[in-house]
Amino acid sequence: MTAPRLSALIVARNEEARLPDCLASVAFADEVVVVLDRSTDGSARIAREAGARVVEGAWELEGERRNTGIEACTGDWVLEVDADERVDAALAAAVRETIATSTRAWHQVPVDNYVGDRLLRFGWAGSFGTTSVPRLFRRGAKRWRAQRVHPGLDWTGQEGPKITRGALVHLVDRDISDMLRRLDRYSSAKAADLIAAGNIGTLRANVRRFFSRGFKSYVSRKGYREGGWGVLLALCTGAFPLLSYLKAKLEPEKHGGRR
């Protein structure tokens, strides 16, 4: 019986500094597809020199560009990896073993999140970070929704057991300032999604989310074990929906809406 073919999919924009290490980490795949969204740096050249197939274009919505990448893959299975992520050797072996035997449509893979050189194992929650992502799937099983940030997912088929060996190493932020800039970017994109959906919510509901999500990060997800870093994660996790609402409410003209 022929072994299943694996496509590694990388979606990026102007990531020439981080793309080489990402590409090297997915070299075990049978095919590498790189989708470049409005990139003006050397990312395309770097990807082609590494043997990847490059798809270039311009997409306003994250869901649309990720679906374009999935459609470009020809393997039986697809592993999605972002430019700031690396597949470690143990996860690469586990992925190969999983696709050789799995009867299910998709699987979660573990994530190790780094801020600078520091591995933060606890406190990731909500839309600000996670320790497990559904990135390994049969081609045709996964479709992203048309949203700008953290788009929803539609699945065909059943979820299989989570992969437990190795990790997707996520270089999520360089430092605290980078984390806060990410919060600003994410909340701006989410504000645009809220305006486009025609329902930005209410101040009361989002104040509740600030406290409930912060509590989930710090207590339920054990962020307290990370000391001050856990406090920071809890604040960002709680602030994301509240900031998104406030931007959509107070500055709609900056995020695609009208006053």
Image (tube, helix red, strand yellow):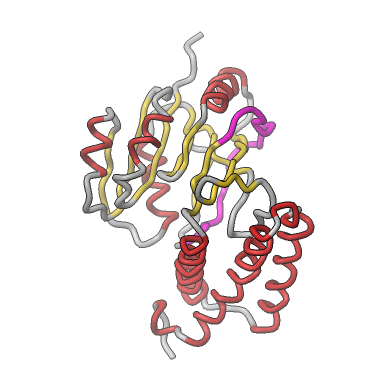
Q: Nearest the camera: 121 or 61?
A: 121
| Foreground of the two, 193 or 104 | 193
Residue lying at 44% horizontally and 22% vertically, measured from the top left: 5
Q: Residue at x 45, y 83 (%)?
A: 252
Outermost residue to the right: 219
In x, y percent, where is residue 176?
Answer: 52, 61
153 within the magenta span: yes
Where in the figure is residue 98, as x and y percent of width and height? 60, 23
Q: Main secondary structure of the magenta part?
A: loop
Q: How many marks?
A: 0
Quadrant for residue 259, please give it.
bottom left
| Image-based side of 49 in relation to 223, left or right | left
Residue extent of the magenta highlight: 149-167
Quarter of image, res 137: top right
User: Extreme bottom residue here?
Assistant: 259
Is residue 56 highlighted in magenta? no
Residue 179 on image: x %, y %? 51, 61
In the picture, measured across the screen, residue 88 lies left or right of residue 107, that is left
Which residue is farthest top? 1
Residue 6 seen anywhere in this rendered image of the structure: yes
Toward which corner of the image does residue 148 lie, by quadrant? Answer: bottom left
Spot occupied by residue 61 in the image (x, y as percentages of width and height): 40, 60
Q: Is residue 134 above or below residue 235?
A: above
**Where is 252 relative to 228, above or below?**
below
Q: Taking the image as drawn, is residue 147 in sight?
A: no
